[in-house]
Structures are given as structure tokens and as C-alpha cells.
Amino acid sequence: MDKFRIENCSDELLCGIDGGGTTTKVVVCNLEGQVLDSFQSGTINHYGAGIPKVKEYFAAIAANIIEKFACLPGTIFTGNSALDGLADDALVQELTNGVFHPSKVVFHSDVYIALLSFTLGNPGAVLISGTGSMACGIDAGGAYHTAGGWGQVLGDEGSAYHIALKGIHAALHAYDGLSEPTMLSASVMKFFDLKKMSDIIDKIYNPPVEKGVIAAFAPEVERAAEEGDPAALHIMESEAEWLYKLALAITKKCITQNLGYFGSVLNHNHRIRSKLSALLAEQFISLQVPRFKPEIGALIGAFRESGHRVSDSVIDNLLKYR
């Protein structure tokens, strides 16, 4: 029998998959929440890697699990950074090529598994600010809500991309004489390796750079703010206020004060996180660090889809995962 087409799955095993933009993390556990195996694969974001490559990665994931356990998990829950919600069966079949049959396979967004890693499926919300930004949550009735997440062209306020873009704007405005001089001008020249400011046109447009290239400039804006640059300080303040608005929007939709956070900006930008925390405290909302990584959130999804309760002992075992 083709090992990719094994007709055997075990309801005693569950699998969670976190499909990020560059790597995929896979975890397998038993019904007690004991993680039995974990490994990484290439990205399953079909917009970035393409469907043929994603099929290869899923085949390799299935083969890896089968080699370890001689069967597939009964339920496989996947968070995919290319999705903004629950995927239909046709897309699941197209991306996996049936390698997980006869397991129950569910595809949702990567932000949803981040949410599950914080709320465990209970009412609550998460604010995410990394390369992009958005918020999502679950209300008391179990309904799923979102705010933001419109991408860099239509939104992404409060994200690393937006912070970086505003920093570049400040440098260009100063260069044009539209605003006061700023340290960000020198930062842009150095970061993008420009001989003259107008070289940034070719650097950005020829060929068009990816979102992450611009977002990588965000720490330079933070550094300028730490040194007291007025333009950078204004950017930090305004981006924190946008995240505050996003947080208020999602907590109102979900009628909750239970708010977790994820993403490089909220994890590493102390100035923005402090400002945001202070604003939220005025509304009696505490910004909290999630206990679990997103791949464990995917396992929580697998527990829920398979009808198994996430008990205190399961949580204790999942907390042992590193």
C-alpha cells in the first residue's frame, strides 16, 4: 500500500498544524494532551509557495506522521496563513491531495488558531500585530468575529509594515521640505543602502519589494523614537492608538475584556505595548500573554472538532510543550 494513502487513522491521536508564511509547525498528541511528536515543514501558504509545492509538503507531513505512528491522527486541525476563515472541503482536498484520508481534516486561518491558543475556545479575543495587523474573537454564543486584517493596501494600521511605511514617509517628507528634519532620513539611507534618497524608487519598485522587506524597517523607527526623534515618537503614538481602536472594536463585538496578544510589534516594541496597555487599562481591559503557542491552538481545535473536552489535566500536559 502507498504509505501516502494509508487507510487507517486513530481516534486516539490528534494533530495540530500551524501553517505560517515561511514555515509550518506540526504537533501530534494523545487524548490526554501529551505531545508525542513535533516537527517542521515548508510553508503551506498556497499563495506564497504555490499549490504544487504545498501538496508536496502535505505529503511529507503525512509520511512523517505515518512513519512515526503507523497511522494518521483521527482529527487534523490546520491554521493556514493564506486563509481568512474556514475552508471548504474542495480547497482542503485540492491542497492535501487526499493524503490525510480517512482523517477528519479542518482548515481555518492562522489567526483563528492563535485565538484558540489564548481562549481555548471560550469567549475572548486576541490582538495581532506583526508584519500585518488584525483582531479576532469568540463571543459567548460561540460566534467568530474579526476586525482589521485588510492587508497593507487597505489597512494594517498598527503593524510593523505600517510603522515602517510611516517612517519612510517621514524621511521622504523631510527630504522634500514638507516637514521638519528627522533622524529617519539617515535611517532610511542606511537601511536600504541608498547613495541618494531618490534611489529608494528603484529599491522599492524595481522589482516591487515584498511586504516583509518594508516591515523590517519598523525597528529603526522604534530606535529613532527611543532617541527622542519627534517624527518617530509621533508614529509610535499614532500606531498605538490605532491598535487601541482595533482592540476596542473586537472586545465590543465579542462583549469581553479577555484580550491576548501576538506578533512581533506587541512582543518586542515596548513603547507601543506600554502605551496600548495604559489606554486599555482605562477601559478595564488587560492585555495578556497567551499561555500556548499557535500550534497548540491548532491542537485545541482538533480536540473541539473531535468532540473531546479540553480538561485541566489536558491543559497541564499541553503546557509541558516547548
Image (cartoon, rainbow, N blue to C red):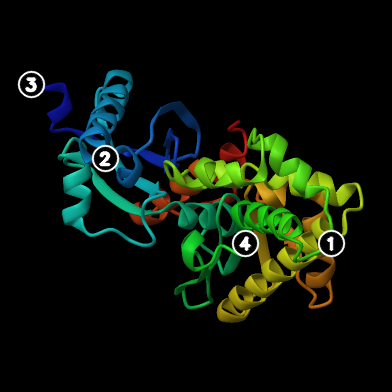
Judging by the rendered image, the residue that carries numbered circle 1 is 180
In the displayed structure, would residue 251 be above or below residue 197? below
Tell me which amino acid carries mark 3: Met
Q: Label 2, label 4: how many angstroms apart (C-alpha)?
A: 28 Å
Camera-side mark, 2 or 4: 2
Measure the C-alpha gap from mark 3 to mark 2: 28 Å
Q: Which residue is mark 2?
A: 50
Q: Earlier in the sequence, mark 3 or mark 2?
A: 3
Pick the front one: 304 or 119? 119
Q: Which residue is mark 3?
A: 1
Mark 1 or 3, closer to the camera = 1
Q: What percent of the width, then of the height, locates residue 74?
A: 28, 41
Q: Earlier in the sequence, mark 2 or mark 4?
A: 2
Query: Residue sitting at 76 percent across and 71 percent down?
Result: 285
Q: CA distance from mark 1 to mark 3?
A: 71 Å
Are dots 1 and 2 in contact, CB under 8 Å? Answer: no
Asked whether the viewer can see residue 306, the reply is: yes
- Which residue is at a point 10% across and 22% down the rendered structure image? 2
